[in-house]
Amino acid sequence: MTGHEHHHSHHQHGHGHAASQPGAPVEHAVSADAAIAQERAREAATPAPGRSVVQVELDAREVDWAFSPDRTTRAWGFNGQVPGPVLEARAGDVLEVQFTNRLPEPTSIHWHGLRIPAPMDGTDMVQHPVAPGETFTYRFRLPDAGTFWYHPHANETVQLERGLYGALIVRGDDEPQLDAERVLVLDDVKLDREGQIKPPGGWMEQHDGRQGPTRLVNGRQEPELTMAAGQIERWRIVNASSARYVRLSLGGLPFRILGTDGGLVEEPVTVEEVLMTPGDRLDLAVGPFAPGQTIEVTSLRYDRRTIARSRNERFATLRIGAEAPSRAVIPARLREIDSLVPADATPTREVHFGVRPSLRTVVKFVVNKQPHHRDKPVKVGETQVWELVNDTLMDHPFHLHGFFFQVLSVNGKPPAFRSWEDTVNLPPRSRVRIAWKADERVGEWMYHCHILEHHQSGMMAHFEVVA
Ligand code: C2O
Ligand code: CU
Ligand code: CU
C-alpha cells in the first residue's frame, strides 16, 4: 500500500522523502553535536530552591492489553500499560526519565506542552530516535504547573494508535482544593474482528485521520466511573486520539473549566460542552451531583468536514453514589494572565495550512505549500504574532512545540476567555491569530497539525529559535 511506503521512508530517513522532490526543502537532519547539546541540557537542569529531582524509569514495549474485559489486544505501552503511568511532579522539580526502547522499531518521547530546552524535545530534529534495546535519558526542569502528556515523536500514526502515550501532571503552589482528582486520557482505536489493532492505511484514513469506533478512557472501553454525591472533583483530561475531536458533554449538565493546555485560566468558566482537539488538555471542576444520578460522558456530534459522518458517542458512564461531605474551595480568581500584545497587533508572519494534489494519496497536507516546510527563524526575545490561515475545507488542530501562546482572535473575534495554549483549532477556511514570545531556549522547534496522519503527510514546519 502506498501509504505504508510513504510512512516508512519518512521514518527511516527523517524527512528524506521531501528532499527527493524538486523544489522541496533540503533534508533536515539531527546536527552532529546533538549529543553534546543533550548532555549540556541534562547537566544544566537543576531543581528550583526547595524542589527535588523526580526520577522515573520508562520503557516502551509490547503488551497484551484488555481494552474490554472479554478479549486481549497486542498493544504497545509505556511500562506495560495503556496509557503509560501518570507522571507527577511539582513545578520547579527536575524530571529525569531513563527511557528504554524494547519495541521492534526506533522511537522517542516528546513532552507535549512542556517549555523545556530544545535538545530534550524528543523530535527527530534534536535527537536520533532511540534504537531497539537502547536507553536515553531525558532530564529537564518542569517550569509550569498544568496537565501535560508524553508520546513518541516517531512513526506516530502507528505508535500512538497502539497505546504509547501517558499523562504528566505538574502541580503548582496555589492550586484550587477539590474533593478528589482524576486523570482521564481519551483515545479511540480501530480493531479488526479478532480484536487486534488494524494496520494503518486507506485513502479515507489518510484524509480524515484515523478515527476508531472503540472509545477508550484510560485504556478501557467506555468504562463506568463512580463519584460521591455532593462532591466536586478536578478532572484532568487529555485527548490522546489520532484524529478525533471530542466535543465533551456530561449529559448536558454544567461544569467549570479551571485550566487549559498551559495551566489555570483566570477564573472558572461555566459551560455545558467544550471542544477538545487531538493533543488538547483541560482541567475541569465537575459536580456536585445528586445521589443516584447517572450521567453519560459523551462526545457530541462535531462536523470537522471529514468523509466519515460524526455522531454522538459515549466515552464513559458516570454513576453518582451516596452523599459525601465536600471540602472543595474554588477561588473566584485562579490566576492572572497578562495579555502579551494588544488584540489588534499586526501579524509578524502568516502560516498557511493547505492541501495540494498528490499522485500517491488523495491529497498532501502541507504548510506554506510544502510538506515538512522550513519556516523562517525566530529571534530570542521577539514577540511573535502569527496569523494561522486554514486554506482547507476541514478543521486542523495547530500545535506549537515548546512555547505557550495566547489566542488573539478566531476570524477576527476574540476568544471567550484568556488562556495559555499549545494547541488550538483552526476551523475550515479560517484565520486564527496567536501571540507568543521566544525566550532564551534556542534550537530547533516545530509546529504541526496534531491529526497524526496530516502531520505525517507533511502538515508541519520546522524553525529555529536563534540568539
Ligand atoms: Cu503532541 Cu509534535 O506533538
Ligand atoms: Cu517534518
Ligand atoms: Cu490536519
Image (tube, helix red, strand yellow):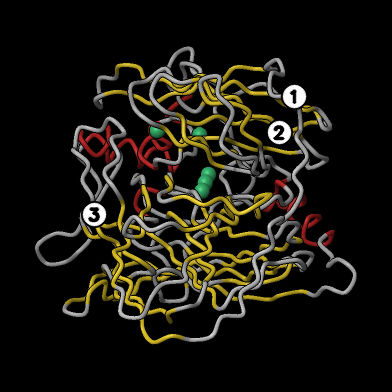
Residue at the extreme left: 193
Q: Secondary structure at mark 2?
A: strand
Picture residue at 61% right of the left edge, 40% below the top: 417
Q: Is residue 243 above or below residue 466?
A: below
Q: Quadrant of the C terminus?
A: top right
Ligand 3, image quadrant it occupies: top left
- Give the spatial CA distance, label 2 vs label 1: 12 Å
- Against 196, residue 428 (above or below) is above
Q: Residue beneath label 1, please?
A: 342
Amino acid type at circle 3 is Glu
Question: Would you place residue 409 above or below residue 222 in this image?
Answer: above
Residue 42 vs residue 144, the one in the foreground: 144
Q: Find out whether the residues at labels 2 and 3 contact each other: C-beta distance under 8 Å.
A: no
In this view, the mark in front (2 or 3) = 3
Element assignment for label 1: loop
In the figure, is residue 123 to the left or right of 53?
left
- For image coordinates 43% across by 56% down, the residue present is 254
Residue 16's spot in the image, x, y percent? 47, 31
Please provide percent x and percent y for residue 41: 78, 55
